[in-house]
Amino acid sequence: MARRDDGYRYQGYRGDKGKSSTFLKVLIVLLAAVLLAGVVFVLFFMGEYMEYTENGPQFRPPWVGESSPAPVIPSDPVVVDDPVVVVTDPAATASVPAFLPAPEPIRAVEITPEQLAGGQTVQMAADAQANAVVVEMKAASGALAWQSKTELAAVLQANAADSSVSDAVSALAADGGLYLIARVQCFRDQALSRSGASPLLDTSGEPWADGDGVGWVSPVSGAAGDYLAALCRELADMGFDEIVLDSSGFPDSGSLDTLTRDGNRPEDLSTPVAAFYAKVEAALAPTDALLSVRTDEDVVRGGNLNSGVTAALLARYARRVWLPAPQWDDTDYAALLTAAGMGDAQARIVLPDGAGWKS
């Protein structure tokens, strides 16, 4: 039986289905076109900036720049270059023994600069049956036996009047018949002390003087150390085979109780002395000249705590150690220096021998 439509039957709302469907289709087509255009652009115009690596394609656009680092891959090992560490604290190297080869034995006679300039050197060496001569080229007064090129020597008026001594040294060096040794008074320097270049002071604030009335400058002074190192280099270039440093630390005799304890005379005396030795060693490094030190028995025995010079420093820096005759029957210089780290200690000790010195 047919259903009669009474005008009140409910019918569901279906909306404007045709228009909505058309809009979605157009949007999909547009997005697909944009995507296709992007792919075409990358392939044809940006393809040269695409890199294919073992980790997949890597896109490197030109605006990033050629200097941009590659991405870090966590799985890759990281190699770190270990930089060379330069030890600038001489105290750190002072305890490292320097097993330097022992120099040739010598028998040396002491001569004056005047005797050297006067042409007496060869005869005096022959009379003493010596193969070496020692001459004090820098005195405690500050006077030099040659004409130094350093600015400070000119300021101090320390230069010799002429070049006769240096000319004689150069001639002997060219002959090669004698081993030439220059002795240098270091921080015991009256001229430097009076110049105001870091002098050691007494408790009244005046320049301190030792028992002979000679003033000292401090090994802490960089200017004094530079000056002395430059002088040593000049002596090596002049023709000397060995440079012997005398008074190369702080004073260890005289009225030490009147010395002021300040920055020029610190609690740690060895570090400034080590720095000075290192400076002279560096100055002599381009030459064949040996660096030696003249000191006393108490330093080697460890009883001299005032100079800053120690047996360990001698072992580290001195190719030869010039010493007085032992004062004690049980003194064994070689054993003491060997214990401090010196190799071939016996061959590197120079002792007085009558009118001269012998190693």
Image (cartoon, rainbow, N blue to C red):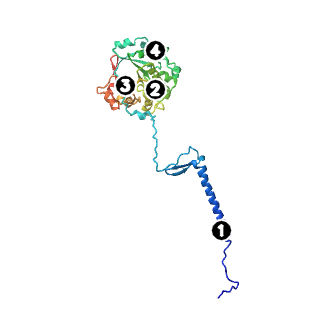
Which residue is at the far bottom?
A: 1
Compare marks 4 and 3 and give the one earlier in the sequence: 4
Residue, disc 4: 167
- Front position among marks 1 and 4: 1
Report which quarter residue 69 is drawn in: top right
The answer to whether residue 213 shows anywhere in this view is: no
**Which numbered disc flags the more N-terminal residue, 3 or 1?**
1
Q: Which sits earlier in the primary sequence, circle 1 or circle 2?
A: 1
Indicate which label's residue lies in the foreground, 3 or 1: 1
Mark 2 burial class by Cα count in 10 Å: few <14, some 14-19, many 20+: some
Helix or strand or loop: what does disc 3 sit on? strand
Marks 2 and 3 in Cβ contact (< 8 Å): no
Q: Is residue 120 above or below residue 88?
A: above
The kind of residue tagged 2 is Ala
Dot 1 corresponds to which residue? Answer: 21
Tag nearer the camera, 4 or 3 = 4
The residue shown at (30%, 26%) is 328
Marks 1 and 2 sit apart, C-alpha to C-alpha, by: 94 Å
The amino acid type found where label 1 is placed reads Ser
Left or right of 81 in this view: 11: right
SS class, disc 4: helix
Q: Which residue is mark 2?
A: 283
Rounded to the nearest angstrom, the CA distance separating label 3 from label 1 is: 105 Å
Between circles 2 and 3, the one closer to the viewer is: 2
Give me the C-alpha separation between circle 2 and circle 3: 17 Å
Residue labelled with disc 3: 320
Instruction: Write the residue at 42% across / 35% down.
Output: 92
In the rendered image, which quarter is residue 313 located in? top left
Q: Earlier in the sequence, mark 4 or mark 2?
A: 4
CA neighbours of label 3 inside 10 A, class few (<14), some (14 to 19), many (20+):
many
